[in-house]
Image (cartoon, rainbow, N blue to C red):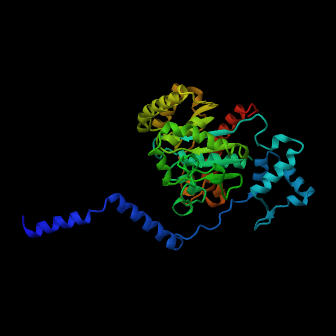
Amino acid sequence: MSKGAESRIAGRRTASATPFDAVIAAHADALTRQLARVGHRLTPPATRRELRRFPTGEAARLIGITDAYLRQLILSDEELEPEKGPAGRRQFTLEQINDVRRRLARTRPAYLRHRRDGEHLQVLAVTNVRGRSGKTTAAAHLAQYLALQGFRVLAVDLDPQAALSGLFGCRPELDVGVSQTLYGAVRRDGGERPLSALVRPTHFPGIDLVPGHLELMACEHGAVPESLVGRVAAALAGVSTDYDVVVVDCAAQLGGLTLGALCAATGILVTVQPQMLDLAGMSGSLRMTADLLGAVRAAGGDLRHDFLRYLVTRYEPHDGPQTQIVGLLRALFGEQVMTHAVPLSAAIAEAGASGRTLYEAGRESLNRQTYDRTVEALDAVNAEIAGQIAQAWGRAA
């Protein structure tokens, strides 16, 4: 061997003397410090987000009264006077809409959607082990729909990619520190914190958030998945008095946290994209889910599910093959396939491109016909789920 070759080999040995795990850790620390120094310059802080205001007609519809009655309430109570938009039309914030609900509930409690004595916390786990199934879109719009109806909602992001957190204005790479996700409440190494300390408000009144982050992947390493099951339920129980509904956006894998969420859930929503490729993998994932839940039950786990529903997403009703697949699902699963579906819509994509949901965007910022048609479909989907919640509570839908 030539001296030059020996020198190159020696050089490689010297360069790799430090284990690569230590090298990677050092790189991570260096990058974290650099981002802390220049992150806000490279990625400017997000402007303070506010939910849009609602015209009188939309506000009245959300409350469940007529336009005329809402105008009468405004005239009879100066504290209810909303702001006026550029055209001189009244515009209500969601806080003002909720204030009207509270006032009306003094004589008719049904105007206030909060849980009543004896009604248990609803935990809705939105799940699918395949990516790009519309899971996060469905979870975000469901959480916001429920908040618009007056429910107190906690959104929990269990996906390390944290797409749900992004829709609520949270930038995990800059805004989420160590143990500020659900991981911080379920870890058992002395660094755990109560979930109440991890909850953060959002720009959407009525919704708080437990954000996602890559650190959630730590739950799948070094911890026995079964040991996480009870911890997730216990963490949610710690904040149960503050909320009516918890919407959990599960990770696209059957890990410990997803299993914990499914076991803690009172309602399970499985998103299904009507494509043969998705159906092909669905059988195996359902079998694995059933086996894991069965093992938890056999071990003494207390599973109390009120409902299971399959939610068709990214649906094109004029597509023949998709219609056939939906028909097949209904034939196999009956009423557990939801009547309404989340459509494949340019309006949802346009709103998502700007980091918003369709409920936030408002019809004035998009094609109005497309917007109205898509919102009508989303409202139908979410009203159907709200009906299941009401039924679980023993209320009229």
Q: Is residue 149 left or right of residue 382?
A: right
Q: Residue lying at the far right in this picture: please name it.
A: 76
Q: Is residue 297 left or right of residue 16?
A: right
Picture quadrant where residue 78 is located: bottom right
Q: Nearer the viewer, residue 56 or 44?
A: 44
Q: Position of residue 82 (x, y in %)?
A: 82, 61
Q: Is residue 253 left or right of residue 85?
A: left
Q: Quadrant of the C terminus?
A: top right
Q: Residue lying at the far left in this picture: please name it.
A: 1
Query: Residue at left 59%, top 44%?
Result: 248
Q: Quadrant of the N terminus?
A: bottom left
Picture quadrant where residue 26 is located: bottom left
Q: Nearer the viewer, residue 15 or 173?
A: 15
Q: Position of residue 183 (x, y in %)?
A: 54, 49
Query: Is 184 located above or below residue 268 in the figure?
Result: below
Examine the rendering and report whether any part of residue 311 can be seen: no
Q: Position of residue 276 (x, y in %)?
A: 42, 36
Q: Residue lying at the far front in this picture: please name it.
A: 190
Query: Residue at left 16%, top 67%?
Result: 8
Examine the rendering and report whether any part of residue 364 can be seen: yes
Query: Is 265 located above or below residue 7 in the figure?
Result: above
Q: Nearer the viewer, residue 74 or 163?
A: 163
| Tag count | 0
Q: Position of residue 202 (x, y in %)?
A: 66, 57
